Image (cartoon, rainbow, N blue to C red):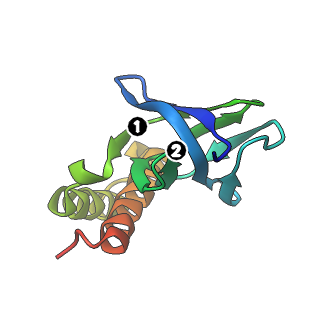
Amino acid sequence: MAMTFHLDVVTAEQALFSGTVEEVIAPGAMGDLGIMPRHSQLISKLRAGELQYRTTEGAMASLFVSGGVLEVQPHVVTVLADTGMRAEDLDEAAAREAMKQATDALQGKDPEDLDYEAIQSELEAAKAQIEMLHRIGKAR
């Protein structure tokens, strides 16, 4: 029997996943993080991207997270995502529209009225969604 640990992925609005897994690959702020059973404890910021996990059946599943925090404890990994969604709920047209709106906002408004950090975060999240859609083969 493979070694496992518990994974919880939550946003402020909903719980995206809660269950037993064999492995997690998370989009850390400084690069991807591979988490296996008995991983040393850590806390890391997350960037927008794909969070993958291997279920006890051996299948890899994916969630999109737009950032947040990852906490690793001896037998539990918790992801507190800013926002997130299941891979099957991603919409390429919506992501492209969000990317266009963020780009337009950066190019066309008075600099005093812009929250550059928020707009840049939205742009990065939209790009990460499109990349994930292409990787999982759901993009046009």
**Dot 1 and dot 2 residues touching (CB under 8 Å):** yes
Q: Is residue 48 visible?
A: no
Say which residue appears at 22% left-offset and 48% top-offset. 89
In-image side of 4 versus 55 (left or right): right
Q: Find residue 75 and report its horizontal and vertical position in percent.
A: 71, 30
In the rendered image, which quarter is residue 69 located in?
top right
Q: Nearer the viewer, residue 106 or 138?
A: 138
Q: Nearer the viewer, residue 90 or 21?
A: 21
Q: Find residue 7 and report its horizontal and vertical position in percent.
A: 56, 34
Q: To which residue does mark 1 refer?
A: 83
Say which residue appears at 43% left-offset and 29% top-offset. 11
Q: To which residue does mark 2 refer?
A: 67
Q: Find residue 39 and report its horizontal and vertical position in percent.
A: 79, 44
Q: Is residue 85 above or below residue 133?
A: above
Say which residue appears at 81% left-offset and 36% top-offset. 41
In the rendered image, which quarter is residue 34 located in?
bottom right
In-image side of 42 versus 88 (left or right): right
Badge 1 marks a residue whose secondary structure is loop
Q: Is residue 68 above or below residue 46?
A: above
Instruction: Calculate the distance from the C-alpha at mark 1 to the C-alpha at mark 2.
Output: 7 Å
Q: Is residue 46 visible?
A: yes
The label number, if any, that marks residue 21 in the structure image: none
- Quadrant assignment for the N terminus: top right
Which residue type does callout 1 highlight?
Thr
- Quadrant assignment for the C terminus: bottom left
Which residue type does callout 2 highlight?
Gly
In-image side of 99 versus 56 (left or right): left
Packing grade of label 2 (10 A; few <14, some 14-19, many >=20) is many
